Amino acid sequence: MGVGVVTVVKDDLFGLKRTEHSVLEQSSSVSWILVTPNDGSETDEYAQQLKLVGIATEIIPDQGSGVYAAMNQAVAEISEVEWLWFLNAGDEFATVNTYELVSKYAKDSINSWIYGGHYLGSKGGKILGEVKTPSQFRISNQLFAKKYVSHQSTIFRAKFIRDLGGFQNHLKIAADWDLMVRASLVDPGLRIPETLSIFYMGGLSTESRQQGNRELFQIRKLYLGRKYILKNYYWFGYRWIRNAIVQNLEGVSIHLTDNIRTIRLRIRNSVHR
């Protein structure tokens, strides 16, 4: 029982080691499950060593059908934990006490899922700022990326994810946000005021921004309806242009784009105090 932390990893030894370091720093022992291809790669061999020495509690062989399919494998195959927390390879707990804190909340919660805030980190490992826990989970805010929640700071009852049908595999980038929306339609979730994770950019969602933009456009159409149709088209176009500009800026100077993000987060947090 308790909280199981699931890390899906493929060909990312650096990211796996960074998450391992965060796991080992925790004030209480972490039930850490890895999902990774059994392909004899450097990452696979390191994962096997983590299991051998008892740092990882379980390894699930990734069948190679994508990130969300691998996450669904964990949902289907893990039976000994009540709660599942998906923390990407390379991402970290916010503090050394975070796992212990979440475990206490989970033990006492009557809700089926829990959410908190996160720190945003750059591809190079710099903390850019804090995205605080929204006062409540609102579907429109989430899908327009306003006062949103990241999946690295959400924890679900395993049975609840199974009852929801898991992650939608036809979505390659935004299936985590889709799951949060579907969860909120059944259960409002337990809000944790603390920040729970550090999400570092540079992964699949960062590298595939335009694909994510297309998927979120479709998800908004599905869940928000005609009331938001004009805003949906506007937001899709705005994000498409913005993503293109950001990608060009990153090609010129990642330091500049990191500074811009830091300033934006400071402004946002000062406005929403």
Image: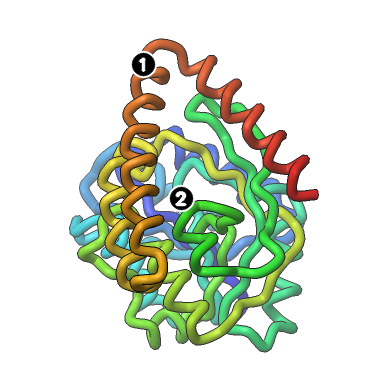
Please say if 169 is above or below 253. below
On the image, the x and y values in percent for residue 209 come to 33, 41
Residue 18 appears in the rendering: yes
Name the element at disc 1: helix
Image side of residue 177 versus residue 119, left or right: left
On the image, the x and y values in percent for residue 9 come to 36, 48
Q: Mark 1: give few (<14), some (14-19) or many (20+) Cα within 10 Å.
A: few
On the image, the x and y values in percent for residue 103 come to 69, 71
Residue position marked by numbered label 2 in the rendering: 88
Q: Mark 2: give few (<14), some (14-19) or many (20+) Cα within 10 Å.
A: many
On the image, the x and y values in percent for residue 208 come to 29, 40
Q: Nearer the viewer, residue 229 or 261?
A: 229
Count of marks overlaid on the render: 2
Could you tell me the amino acid type at mark 2? Asn
Report which quarter residue 75 is drawn in: bottom left
Could you tell me the amino acid type at mark 1? Gly
Q: Nearer the viewer, residue 154 or 223?
A: 223
Q: Of tags 1 and 2, which is closer to the observer?
A: 1
Residue at figure coordinates x 50%, y 86% from the top left: 186
Please say if 11 is above or below 33. above
Residue position marked by numbered label 1 in the rendering: 251
Residue at figure coordinates x 63%, y 84% from the top left: 111
Label pair 1/2, CB-CB below 8 angstroms: no
Residue 73 appears in the rendering: no
Going from N to C along the chain, the mark reached first, 1 or 2, is 2
Q: Nearer the viewer, residue 247 or 200?
A: 247
Image side of residue 220 versus residue 123, left or right: left
Please say if 98 is above or below 191. above
Separation of disc 1 and disc 2 at Cα? 25 Å
